[in-house]
Every structure is written in C-alpha cells, then in structure tokens.
Image: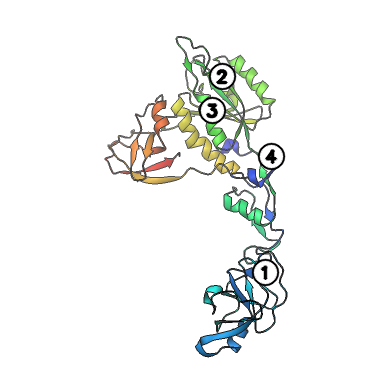
Amino acid sequence: MADVLRDLVPRTETVPLRRALGRVLARDLVAPLSLQPFDNSQMDGFAIRAADSRAAAGEGGSAAFVVVEPVPAGHVPGPLAPGRAAPIMTGAPLPPGADAVVPVEEALPRAYPVPGATVRLPAGQRPGRFVRRAGEDVAQGDPALRAGQRLTPARIGLAAALGVAELAVRARPRAVVYSTGDEVVAPGAERGPAQIYDANAAILRAQLEEAGVEVVGAHLVPDDAEAFTARLAADAALAPDLFVSSGGVSEGAYEVVRQVLEPGGAFVHVAVQPGGPQGVALAHGVPFLCLPGNPVSALVSFEMFVRPALTEVVGAPAARASLTGPLAQAARPLPTRTQVRRALWDGTTVRMAGGPGSHLLAAAARANALAVLPPGDAELPAGTPVEVLLLD
C-alpha cells in the first residue's frame, strides 16, 4: 500500500509549538542562535580564573580568593580581576576573564561570604570546570532539526530553546471513509431484520485520526455501482489526499468497490487471516485503499498495511512498538497463511483474546496487542516466542 501513496505530497502549514507534538517537520530548522548562547555556570558556586587557584595555592591544598559581587542568573556580570571569586548561580553568564566554576560545597566556608571577604577554594582547578560553553550543544547556523523528523517533546523543547515559537510541518492528510453494503446501517438509525449496525466507519475514522489523518467525510455506500460512482465524484470535490473503504472488495456478486475501481486498480487476496481481500486504486487521481468488510478484518488490515504505509511515506504516525514474547498457552497456526490474533500482553506473556474469527469485535476490544503467528502445520506450544505488536 505504500506504493500507491508514493505520490501523496502533504501540504505545509505553520503551527505554534503547543500544537506541534507528533507532527512531521516540513523544513530544516536552522539554529538562529547558539546553544548555549553564552558561557554560563553549570553549578551554584564561585567563578574564578583557574590559573589563580594554582598560583595562590597554600597549605592544605587550597587557595584564597577575595569575594566580589555575586552574579545571579539573568544578569550581565562585569569582568573578573585576578585573585577574585564571584559567587555565581546556575545558568548565570560567566564573568569575562573567568574560566572555571567551583561548587559552593567545596568552599571554606561553605557559604557565600559578603563582597570583600575571603573564601578558600581547592587548588589546582582546571579551565572549563562546570562551565557550559557557548555553542557546545548547537552552533548558530547549523541544522538543529531535519525535515521529515517527527516532533517529540525533546525536539519541540529544542525549538523553544532556540527562540522559535512556531514550526512548518506537513499538513495532516485528509481522508474520506466508506463503509459498503446494503446490510449496514448507521448507529442510532432504525435497523431492519437483516441488517447490522456499521462499526467499520467508526473503527477506521478512529484509526485514521490516531494516525494523524483528518477525516473529512464518512459515508455508507449501498451495493449500487452508480450510487458509489456519484458519491466518489462528490467527495473528490473535497480535495482529499486519500480514500479508504471497507467491504466490497472480494469476489462476490455485489462487490461495489471492486466493480467501480477494478479497471484501474489491483485487487488481491493476501495470505493473512483476518484480512485476505485487499485492493489499491486511484479515484479522481487520489489514492484509494480498499480493505475487507468484516470489522476485525478492517481493523487488523489497517494496522498491518495502512498505518505502516503512512509511516513510511508521510513520516507519521510513529510505528507501533513491537517485541517478541512467549505464548501463555498453545496456539495452532494456519498451514498457508499468517494469522494475526488479537491478544493480551501483560509484560511477560502473550495470551489470545478470544478466537480468530474476523467478526469477534468484543474480543478485539479487550485486546491490547496483535500476535503474529507464521504459517505452519504444527501446534505452537506454550512458551513459543511470537511477534507482538502493541496497540496500547
């Protein structure tokens, strides 16, 4: 599915930092200033000239300094004369001439004497001790963040530290969702004796929104090719980046999505259960991802195929965390197909949540993971390690 999304080029928009979490940076962020912007103290202590601590070393391995005016954070200090020690707070600028900071815990007395008094500090201090140098983190003019990076709290914090209040990000892709079939009705509507309430639109809307996609429309589509064609034409006017459907993609007599899109699309049966029938196409020049109609099949197909494709092509959402964990009980795989089971991961073992049926939505609602069982003829005994995809 990533291939059909290759030409999806997200628009660019500018957002304030408070709305940037999880978004994908559209352009490199070049540092407008250095971090640190000036030499400053890493500790509460005394700013000194390191050479003075060697030249004035006396008995007991300490050197005497005359205390000058303190340097609070946020204030610009004057130059530091030889033999002087300036009480300095964490983050305060280093006085010109100073090149080291001695923590107040190492001073005698272990306090800040008044200006003019004497303080003794350990001899042999080295230049740069407890000094944060200007530009040691990021130099002005260097790339601080790269286009395509997903904005995490640390990256947003870096932008803020550089004085940047807003960032250019890739706009959220816009999608239209379809649920197909004469047998489905919207939740809250009157249900006929042979009808069921549609869960797929709610599932796919939630999955898309969780993946950073804006859903601009969601519709029920009857088993009528003309009605579906008209619906597509109307929704194309919304300028979506993506169409996603559930149902109507198999080989039955009423597969409306396949009937309308097959001339320019590709419809296959993948060796995965649930989620066998899949399709990709273009409609009005817009990528169209066609998922199977059973609710769990649609849910699993999105997680296995659509979400990873969005991550690969758009850069968001973040990939699901995966791990290998032992089965809590025996499980029997399918001979020729990969089976994706709804599962409960407790941090130690993986336990199946209900049976493998693609209609068992309550079991899927209990699950916090998907367990991937490779094809095989033999039962997998308890303790067998399997791939686990974490959903929560």
Of the residues under marks 4 and 1, which one precedes in the sequence? 4
Of the residues under marks 2 and 1, which one precedes in the sequence? 1
User: The residue under label 3 is which amino acid type?
Assistant: Cys
User: The residue under label 2 is which amino acid type?
Assistant: Leu
Which residue is rendered at x = 46% and y = 25% of the image? 295
Q: Using the image as rendered, state which of residue 302 and residue 270 is in the foreground.
A: 302
User: The residue under label 4 is which amino acid type?
Assistant: Arg
Name the mark on residue 93.
1
Q: Using the image as rendered, state which of residue 383 and residue 379 is in the foreground.
A: 383
Which residue lies under the disc numbered 2? Answer: 220
Disc 4, disc 1: CB below 8 Å? no
Of the residues under marks 3 and 4, which one precedes in the sequence? 4
How far is the residue under mark 1 from the one under mark 3? Answer: 60 Å
Which of the 4 quarters of the picture holds residue 11?
A: top right
- In this rendering, which labeled residue sits more in front, label 2 or label 1? 1
- In this rendering, which labeled residue sits more in front, label 1 or label 3? 1
Residue 194: % across, % down: 45, 11
Which of the 4 quarters of the picture holds residue 73?
A: bottom right
**Where the N terminus falls, by quadrant?**
top right
Horizontally, is 46 left or right of 387 in the view? right
How far is the residue under mark 3 from the one under mark 2? Answer: 14 Å
Which residue lies under the disc numbered 4? Answer: 11
Of the residues under marks 3 and 2, which one precedes in the sequence? 2
- In this rendering, which labeled residue sits more in front, label 4 or label 1? 1
User: From the viewer's perspective, is residue 165 above or below residue 31?
Assistant: above
At numbered mark 1, what does the secondary structure look like: helix, strand or loop?
A: loop
Residue 186: % across, % down: 53, 18
Q: Residues within 10 Å of mark 3 (few under 14, many from 20)?
A: many
Horizontally, is 7 left or right of 303 in the view? right
